[in-house]
Amino acid sequence: MIAPEQRAEIRRLFYAEHWRVGTIATTLGVHHDTVHHAIERDRFVRTGTQVRPSALDPYKAFLAATLEPYPRLRATRLHAMLRERGYAGSAVQVRRYVRTIRPAARAEAYLRLETLPGEQAQVDWGNFGAFPVGGARRALSCFVLVLSWSRAVYARFALDQTLESFLRGHVEAFTALGGVPRTILYDNLKSVVLERVGDHIRFHPRLLELAGHYHFAPQPCAPYRANEKRQASYCSSFRLCDAHWGKRRRSRKRFPGWARGNGPVGGSKSILAPSSARIARSTPSRAKRLAVV
């Protein structure tokens, strides 16, 4: 304990004269803890984080409500939406706050897709750059049909992606493979799906006519689910033909029609089995691998 007079002197020297604690302790011959106890500095220490008011406060509820159904919406888009509602702050402030409240991405599980022999095929268009035709260059496309079980591939190159070329690819693939699969999986391209609202799908009438003639069921993939049709997507990519025409030598080994001098356009076609071991494990009879009509 110290006398009230000494306590008052310590407080005067600290608060009025702005002496340091060590200087007061040395001058008055007391301990540092005695000086700290006399000045009661702990009473003026603010505990916890001090939250300052922000111009973003009135809009935080709107941001949380918007991110709940659309968790992948960018902070710049949210800032533009706030500007239309009267927010005058910067995009940096919005970005910092959105980073703290954005819902975590949900982990999505994928099941391995397995099909029975002759049950399903996958169809897609592939883009292979430009091809010289005379003095001009035309966009080169490739129609690809892959059997989901055996991985056997039919490919046909064309200079367009019209409905006629699309249907012709089906007919020639069925002829080359010797049968028709029960189901054909498509992307949501206009040659297949004219309109889609949820699970309600309006197919192209010409495709339905072809399906009725060859007795197969068209089935479009779910939107944004490329994993459902990854075999055809892979085979229609540049990786199937070694990325470009600059590597024709290896590409012709995979597509024998090129080696005959016909070129990639004009009716050349080939059946490609990417995995010979897969075909070796298959039933040799092609009729058993396909739903033959």
Image (cartoon, rainbow, N blue to C red):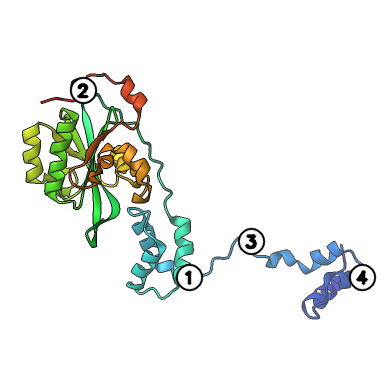
Could you tell me if the residues under marks 2 and 4 are in contact, i.e. CB atoms within 8 Å? no
Quickly name the residue at label 2: 286
> Which sits earlier in the primary sequence, circle 1 or circle 2?
1
Q: CA distance from mark 4 to mark 3?
A: 30 Å
Does residue 97 lie above or below 140 as drawn? below
- Please name the amino acid that badge 4 sits on: Thr
Question: In the displayed image of the protein, which residue is found farthest to the bottom?
Answer: 17
**Lateral position of residue 131 relative to residue 246, left or right:** left
Q: Dot 1, how many residues are within 10 Å of its Cα: few (below 14), some (14-19), or many (20+)?
A: few
Q: Dot 2, how many residues are within 10 Å of its Cα: few (below 14), some (14-19), or many (20+)?
A: some
Quickly name the residue at label 1: 54
- Please name the amino acid that badge 3 sits on: Thr
Q: Which image quarter is the C terminus in?
A: top left
Quickly name the residue at label 3: 47
Could you tell me if the residues under marks 4 and 1 are in contact, i.e. CB atoms within 8 Å? no
> Which sits earlier in the primary sequence, circle 3 or circle 2?
3
